[in-house]
Image: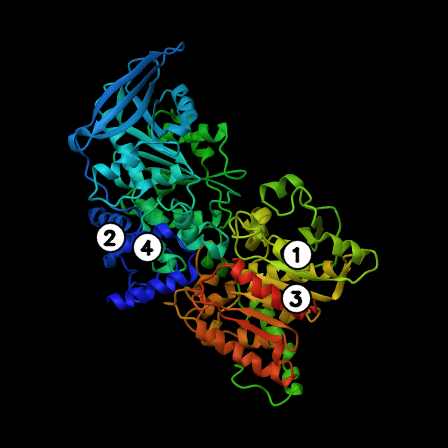
Amino acid sequence: MNDAAGRRRIEALRGYLRPSPEWDAWLEKSGELPPDFDALRSVPNLPEPLRFGGTEARSPRDWPATRERILEAFRRWVIGSYPETPGNVAAETLEEHAEPDGSRVREVLLTFGPERRARLHAQLALPPGPGPFPVFMTQRNHYGWGRVALARGYAAAIYDGCDGTDDTQAFKEHWPEHDWSMLCRRAWGGGRVLDWLHTLPEIDRRNACITGHSRNGKLSLIAGAIDARFTAVISSSSGIGGACPYRFANEAQFSEGIELITFNFKEWFHPRLRFFAGREDRLPVDANLLLALSAPRAVLVSTALNDPCESARANELAVDSAQAAWKLQGADAAEKLRLLYRWGEHEVHAEDLEAYLDWCDLHFGRAGASEAARIRGRFGETRFYPYRYEAWRARGDEDTAPEPQELARPPASIQAWEAGREERRARIEWLLGEAPPSAARKHGPYGREAEYASVLLHRPGLGAPPTLVREAFSFGEYVSGHLYAPRVALERARAGGPKLPLAVWLQPESVASGYSAAYTRGERLPAPLARAGFAVLAFDAIGNGGRIQEGARFYERYPRWSLLGKQVHDARRAVDAARELEGVDPERIFLVGFGLGGMAALLAGALDQRVAGVASACGFSPFRAERPAAPSGGLARYALWDAGGLLPRLGRFAGEPSRVPIDFDEILALLAPRPLLCVTPRFDREADFEAVQCALDRAAGIYALYGAGPKLWRHAPDDHRRYGPELQAPLHAALRRAAGR
């Protein structure tokens, strides 16, 4: 790419990334330009470990070359370069003592590198006896982890490669020719501690584990990737940049993502990683490949179900994909690479540490037959996203698909359009699948979300802020929801004043925290919508937040329905409840959604005439325009990809998108003449921008028939797929106008 094209790419990135003086300084100093994204292959699903670099690894002999290509790509784009093992590590004992239980503790200063100027403090605690002892290594701020390991008979090594005590920062001065990131330096430092440990007769050189939590979990995975002497790696809530893929956990899913990490934690990774914010499909590597670099050794991925730093669904995808590297080398992938769920959020408890040490006991041969069987039972894997398309098809889906009818040109009259309305709705219902029988139910207090769960899920409005009301109840099929509203306006409405318009807030995929968003810029959703003058009814989509377990067995219960069908159904049940809420205007109920929620809003609004209007941000890309090689992944992402299963019936059209029975031009048109507000960013990699605009143009023809052209509002910012304050502000303003506020 020439300099002019590169500068244009830089300016495009600066147009939607938040200003970062540090990143700008790096660009200026390095002269770096973004890659030619058009020349990089788009991989919307996870890159395949055995086919990396264009050559397929077919036997164990092929793996070392494939592994080196993967590692080189990580060095280039994510972690930076690092030195070879220096080979001259020396240890100076600073302090040594015996403890009452017979264990021995030694504080040392390691020196190494050019003229041994590099320094790294470490502590080694040895159990009573001569050894040799297996190693449990972690960082200084996990000192307590080391004490638990010591009590279990491990040599506990901790070192100063963490926040608060980081000797590795000075490595930049000693090896200026390398551009390693902070986490890479800390990971490499763990290898230097291992250099020293391998000189000690008390140490079992065959069995060494490195572990850490959160950002230390990331560096532990990096350490395992660059140093094969770590025979076990435990990643504890390592999140995005660790075991959680960038492609499936970013701002579009209300996760941390590349943009937020590289803005808030600028030294964690190489500055080049920031180029891929919003273009995750072009990043050559991802978390599954980071895991694969430790194959065939023992790797445990520990994650809390509602940890805002990661996504249970994304972690499952990464682990399942990485297993190919273990299988290639003849290792038992299910035995050596495991996903361990914890309950709660980002915290770690004593029982979790015991499980981590059980994992080491199992793979270091320290457990007898009965104990090994117990441990294996402890690590029996749970899957909360078990969907597989072939298994779904095997249960039987023989319905003949309706033939498509394109909306190539608007009908001649309103009457002609209305004549086909019900048939088009029937096509939507066919695509969503066969819903089970459903009984109407009034909303009420039973089944509402407990307050401790609201705290866990970071619901806005905790502590009863003075300006907003938050009320909990359940509706529909025992779905927990919250009403948010401006306190004074709601009290006035309930006292006989003007009733409030209501917005049903429909979230994108946001596994950890559901509707309230794990990571968001500005005030936590849906509070900004309430501050715009609306009552808001919010609830978690199935498979997210407080409903992760409910989604796990969905297709066992309802093999002919769909997860998207259930989300649409819940949205319509929310409309039922909203119409009964005191102080709410039943004629002004709007559906507002982003991402997956934006799609559900469009479908529910098309099916339900009671909906006064729809506001959808990043809510659709026309089905019939989808291509398998598109950055979105085409129709396959809805049906064929594992751990998904949003809309299985689309799977039969993955190679023939023109046969999809209904498309979004018709769905949008079914909303006419009601207000339709669409935000369609130009750089949304999950949407074909030109096809989106074409669908809106076609729907505009139907709006024109009704004389309702102004009610179709569209906004196309120069941005990628996210729902920050800069997108919410114009959408909320348009929604206020539509509601007559």
**Label 1's element?**
helix
Residue at left offset 38%, top offset 20%? 150
Q: Give the number of the mark in front: 1 or 4.
A: 1
**Three-letter code, disc 4:** Glu
Tell how many labels: 4
Instruction: Check disc 1 and report the residue beneath it.
Output: 530
**Three-letter code, disc 1:** Ala
Do the residues bearing badges 2 and 4 touch, measured as CB atoms within 8 Å? no
| Distance between mark 3 and mark 2 Cα atoms | 57 Å
**If you read the primary sequence from the N terminus, does the residue marked by circle 1 or circle 4 appear first?**
4
Query: What crowding class fits label 1: few (fewer than 14 Cα within 10 Å), some (14-19), or many (20 or more)?
Result: many
Q: Which mark is residue 48?
A: 4
In the rendered image, the residue lying farthest to the bottom is: 412
Instruction: Check disc 3 and report the residue beneath it.
Output: 736
**If you read the primary sequence from the N terminus, does the residue marked by circle 2 or circle 4 appear first?**
4
Residue at left offset 55%, top offset 55%? 555
**Label 3's element?**
helix
Q: Give the number of the mark in front: 2 or 4.
A: 4
**Three-letter code, disc 2:** Ala
**At which x and y percent is residue 365?**
33, 27
Q: Nearer the viewer, residue 607 or 173?
A: 173
Instruction: Check disc 2 and report the residue beneath it.
Output: 57
